[in-house]
Image (tube, grey):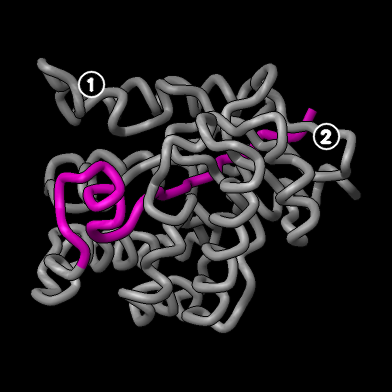
Amino acid sequence: MIGPVACFTFDNMGEAAEIGEGRAQPGEGAASGLHPSLARGYPNLLRLLDRHSVRASFFVEGWNGEHHPDAVAEIVRSGHELGMHGWLHETWHELDCDREAELARLATGALEAAAGVRPVGFRAPGGMRTSHSEAILAGLGYEYDASLGEGREPRLLPSGLAQIPFVWPGVDGFHYLRPRPASPSEVRDLWLEVLERTAERGGVFLTICHAFVTGVDDQRLASLDTVIGAARSDPRVVIMTVGEIARALRA
């Protein structure tokens, strides 16, 4: 078992998911440059991580590589790890093999062109990969998949691809995007409790936050700030990116 490890990850960028879901038209957000996740969310999150000197993993839709290349490049310039999150946040587990391979290739190339580095990891939009994903990702040179997996522990898949799974209570939207959202203090306390349990027993404490959910809200940011600060100050806990966990599995 790896750990105790804390891992902070972030999904989505700009209006890509809204376009993919048909709630926005291509070019609307890019023309204005004012999508809240880009105007406020990403700057807030990057400042928070910089304040704690913490490296995180960001999973970005490949569409952003063409439409928001500077924002994609800023992730890498800020010292963080770049991952792929589909092309337009497709319902990934419903894709057929050919379409999945096409979108994975397209997204990988667009992100690499924008950032100057190839994305090292993948998280399926919606969390679920297909039976073909492992082979497709391995063929594109990916190091890990950070989607939902069988069990909760990181492991190596038969292809050698690392699987670093998440659980839904570690996702900000699980708590905040519901008819009666949890309060930021409730989420903070839950995550602090899980972090403490991880510090005592080992394993990986992993969160997924979104710029449009946590990054634009001061109270939610403050709660995440407290959790990252607790991990940073706990001598029992090592903070790692998802890629670093994947490489530790192979060591």
What is the crowding at mark 1: few (fewer than 14 residues within 10 Å), some, or many (at least 20)? few
Indicate the secondary structure of the residue bearing disc 2: loop
| Mark 2 burial class by Cα count in 10 Å: few <14, some 14-19, many 20+ | few
Residue sitting nearer the eye, 251 or 193: 251
To which residue does mark 1 refer? 186
- Verify whether residue 8 appears in magenta: yes
Q: Amino acid at mark 2?
A: Leu
Rounded to the nearest angstrom, the CA distance separating label 2 from label 1 is: 35 Å
Q: Secondary structure at mark 1?
A: helix
Is 52 placed above or below 220 here? below
Residue at 70%, 29% in the rendered image: 131
Q: Split into 4 quadrants, where in the image is the N terminus?
A: top right
Numbered mark located on residue 157 in the image: 2
Q: Is residue 233 visible?
A: no
Count of all numbered marks drawn on residues in the image: 2
Residue 158 visible in image: yes
Residue 128, image quadrant: top right
Q: Which residues are magenta?
A: 1-26
Q: Is label 2 in contact with label 1 (beta carbons under 8 Å)?
A: no
- Identify which residue is drawn at 41% across, 60% down: 52
* Residue 214 rendering spot, x and y as whole percentages: 23, 44
Residue type at numbered disc 1: Glu
Percent x, y of residue 57: 52, 55
234 with respect to 204 (left or right): left
Q: Going 16% across and 58% down the picture, which residue do you hit? A: 25
